[in-house]
Image (tube, grey):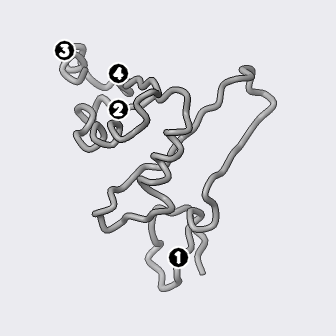
Amino acid sequence: MLLAHGFGRDGGDEQEVTLGHLLSNLFISTPNQPFENLVLLDTPGYSKADTSGYSAKTDEKIARTQLNSSNFILWFVQADAGTITDSDIAFIKTLNESIPKLIIVNKADKLMPDEIEEVV
């Protein structure tokens, strides 16, 4: 058996076991974090239930559960990807309305200023 992080098979004939099948959550803490009341949560990417790669343990359901347990959501969009996708907007709309959300344009340095305005 191959123990992998979940990004696919290595092309071998062995059966794949991903960390997502073994762990539902992984928490890492450090005493060096200077802010007592700040926790950063990095959710997995998500796949819709109607896609071939969907797994209830690793995708949309877990991301929604984790995000709905947050006090504030920062949603990063890569500037060079164009803009936030309709599917991301639809997903965000399914989250708890009372949680403040901020969309952040990431990698803005890869575009010209007028292109950034178009993305925003």
Residue type indicated by callout 3:
Asp
| Res. 29 image quadrant | top right
Residue type indicated by callout 4:
Asp
The label shown at residue 16 is: 1
Question: Pointer 2 and pointer 1: residues touching (CB < 8 Å)?
Answer: no
Q: Earlier in the sequence, mark 2 or mark 4?
A: 2
* Quadrant holding the N terminus: bottom right
Distance between the Cα atoms at labels 2 and 4?
13 Å
Q: Earlier in the sequence, mark 2 or mark 3?
A: 2
Q: Earlier in the sequence, mark 2 or mark 1?
A: 1
Residue in view at x 35 percent, y 24 percent: 105
Q: Few, some or many C-alpha atoms within 10 Å of disc 1 (few <14, some 14-19, many ≥20)?
A: some
Q: Residue furthest right?
A: 31
* Quadrant holding the C terminus: top left
Q: Few, some or many C-alpha atoms within 10 Å of disc 4 (few <14, some 14-19, many ≥20)?
A: few
Residue in view at x 28 percent, y 41 percent: 90
User: Between residues 54 and 16, which one lies in front from this camera angle?
Assistant: 54
Kindly identify which residue carries mark 2.
77
Q: Secondary structure at mark 3?
A: helix
Question: Pointer 2 and pointer 4: residues touching (CB < 8 Å)?
Answer: no
Residue 34, horizontal then vertical, whole percent: 75, 21
Question: Pointer 1 and pointer 3: residues touching (CB < 8 Å)?
Answer: no
Q: Few, some or many C-alpha atoms within 10 Å of disc 2 (few <14, some 14-19, many ≥20)?
A: some
Q: Secondary structure at mark 1?
A: strand
Q: Nearer the viewer, mark 2 or mark 3?
A: 2
User: Between residues 49 and 77, which one lies in front from this camera angle?
Assistant: 49
The label shown at residue 109 is: 4
Kindly identify which residue carries mark 3.
114
Q: Is residue 68 left or right of residue 51?
A: right
Q: Earlier in the sequence, mark 1 or mark 3?
A: 1
